[in-house]
Amino acid sequence: MQPLNSSAVPSTFNPTSPKALGKRKSISAEQDSPGAGGEGHSSTFGQTAKFHSVQTVVADQPTSKRLKISHASENIMWAQGTMGISKGKGISRPITIDLTKGPSSFQPHIGPKRLVIKNLKDNSALKDNKKYYEDTWDQLNTALTCILHRKPLAIPNDTLSRGVEAICRYGRSAQLSAHVKTRSEEYLHSQLRPLIEREAGTTAVGILRCVHRNWVEWIDKLTFLRSIFVFLDRSYHLRTRDCLTLEDQGIAQFRHEILKKGRIGLDIHGRRGARSISEWAVAGVCELVQFDRLGEDSKFDAVLLRDSVSLLRISGIYWKGFHGADGTSYGAFQPEFLRFSDDYFEEFAKERSTSAIDIYIKACETLIEKESLRCDAFNFDSTTKRSLLDQAYYNLIEQCSSILLSLDGVSKLIDADARGSLKALYRLLSLSKIQQNLKGPWESYIKNRGSAIVSDKERIKEMVVRLLELKKKLDLIIRDSFKKDESFSFKLREAFSNFINDNANTNALGKDSGNSKVGEMIAKYLDELLRGGVKVVPRSLISDAQDRAEAEKLGQASTGDEDAELDRSLEQGLELFRFIEGKDVFEAFYKKDLAKRLLMGRSASQDAERNMLAKLKSECGYSFTHNLEQMFKDQELAREEMALYKDSTGKQSMELQVSVLSSAAWPTYPEVDVKLPDEVAMHIEKYDRYYKHKHSGRKLTWKHSLAHSIVRAHFNKGTKELLVSAFQAIVLVLFNDIDSTGNLSYIDIAAATGLVDAELIRTLQSLACAQFRVLTKHPKGRDIKPTDTFTVNLAFTNPKYRIKINQIQLKETKEEVEQTHERVYQDRQYETQAAIVRLMKTHKRLAHPNLVAMVIDQTKKRGMVEVAEIKKNIESKFRSLSLRLFVLIW
């Protein structure tokens, strides 16, 4: 470091001038040396010292503060021995003295010392400082003018920034802040506001665009001002209470001078100033939103809308506006936007409510989705979005709930299987928390639709399939549209149970059917599935991919397993069975159908039969399936018995298969007299002797109506095996005794077989008028008459070698159905009477209404009995009891 000479510093040096800013004060110290001559300058501390050389001492304090130097001996260390004076030359080397260190080894007794502070201010420097600050002020004022009027600056930005710092350090921060604020207000009031009022135009969007353009320019100016007056912001604005930064101050001034005081338009007296600029800006934003809602893309400006929302948020009029002289509030965006949107939603609902419900739902869903996306895309506040959507929910959903929840509208959606619209409806109602109100029309639709299916006489054979299709459709709606809402599943089960057990529906099928017709049809549907397997399952009831995947996840079955599909179809039938309160009719018909399947070997799968039996057992208990299980055991015993018989007799000319059944477990069948062929009668008599010899005391009753045979027939196109019933086989064998071209009359066949007319007509129709016509009827026709004659159809052909013609055995006649219903009815009467006796024995004394109610409760699991029938049984039991007492007393 080089020593400083006092002559190097001019007397007019300004320590606070821009050139001196950043420089550090220099302190020079001299020490006397022998032969130096002359006295040094007097120090400010009143101590005199001789200086041999000048040494620079650097103090790291801000230039705005006065340098403090202590005269204490420990602050300055002098070491004479280390001064490094060269003898003979009188030249000493400069030594740096660090005044910032701690106590030194200064020895005051060595000699007199003197401190000299260089660069002291003199009176002439004060005049120069004043002029410097005046010039800097003028430069900053000129810069303000240039910035506000968007003119180039004549002075560099860094020079202006140092000038701001100098002014602030000079203690004029408050004056400079007030000056900037005043100049900004003057510019906004006298320049910008008249400009906007003059150039804005007359439309809300035009005014908004003009305000936005000037707002952007104003923000740019504030940014430029802040870059120059940043020292003022940091040193004064941020440290002064109730003082805004330049940016916040500029925004507040724009809000006050432009948005609040600015007026555009004419009032009712024709004077300018009807509405404030803030009101026009808010109206412009609302108008842009309206353009977007109406799809007027040519008028909509997305960039302007996004920037305008930002303007409203930054300027503070998004939530809070201004108060007029009369105390009213105006200029706030959110309240005005919500009022504007509320009117739009109300008008939208009024226009769309007259259209179809699916169109209205789609329109509402689309509108709500667009409103939500717009709020997100254009930076609307979250409170605005929530309030806006609440208004949409109220106007579009709650106010129009009578339309959305109308039974007619919901029924149309369900009939059309419009799961998308139903999903949208459920979602819309969920938004307003009223989705549970949909259960009313949902349940009403199920009851009406189900009642119509059950009471349809013309399509009674399709009843179960139609009910299952209805239930599957409703289940899919719950799964795909109602988010698997259990409350809707509960209503579905409740509605099905209601219409299935409603006597008003089942009575439409016949006055004696009661509530039993549905049980009969379910039993027949399950019989069809168990006979035909998965190939007879209606395509409309086959599980979809999602159901199969869920079943596989639960470990129920594989997605591609036919047995699993059959099991699912049986489970669907059981779901309807669970709705039936009286299960006795189902039991009777299922038992008859199971017997035919077992005896004729027509079950598609023994595993499916046993699985079905297990399902019924778990559903209804052991007592319900006891007889059914016994039927399977009888079949096993019959096979074992037949194997022993064949071992004992050896090979026979005709293969005979006999099933010995216990009469208690199997259904009862009517006796039908028939004349068997001699060979068949011989084999039957032989087995009868064998069985009676082995099981003494037992009696066999032969049921020829359940027998079936395989007959080998020779036609012109080849030999076929015909699987026929016993009656069909007896009729066909008669044609072996005549010529191939001969014929047999109806009377001849009746005399040879001994069949009653009803059975013979059914048998001949199945052979000559059905799908497989192995006999030819003369004359042709569907009806069998006593005058008809029959010949063998030698031209019969079929691609299959074995042909099943005994389908007639599996079909029940109308008389058989009526007999089954009659037996069920009689069984109900017996059960009712037994329940009356049990109750009276248990309680001894009961009021008549209580007795009726308790009888209903005990018998409803088997079958619902009419109250009139219960009263009749009570009356008959007490009459018979009174008669017995009378006889005993007499």
Image (spheres, grey):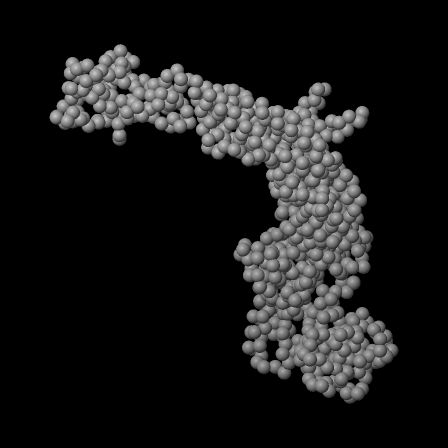
Q: Where is residue 92 in the image (x, y as percent from the top left)?
A: 18, 26
User: Which x, y percent locates residue 240?
Assistant: 49, 21
Residue in the foreground of this view, choosing between 312 and 622: 312
In the current view of this chain or complex, which residue is farthest to the top?
A: 46
Q: In which quarter of the image is residue 42?
A: top left
Residue sitting farthest toward the left: 88
Q: Nearer the viewer, residue 686 or 201?
A: 201
Residue ID at (76%, 84%)? 795
In which quadrant of the rendered image does the C terminus lie?
Answer: top right
Q: Is residue 791 above or below residue 87?
A: below
Q: Position of residue 609 (x, y in %)?
A: 61, 62
Outermost residue to the right: 787
Q: Where is residue 453 in the image (x, y as percent from the top left)?
A: 76, 54
Viewer-nearest residue: 727 or 772: 772
Viewer-side residue, 284 vs 815? 284
For the question of whether residue 642 can be seen, the reply is yes
Q: In this view, does 244 lie to the left or right of 107?
A: right
Residue at 71% from the left image edge and 32% from the top image edge: 198
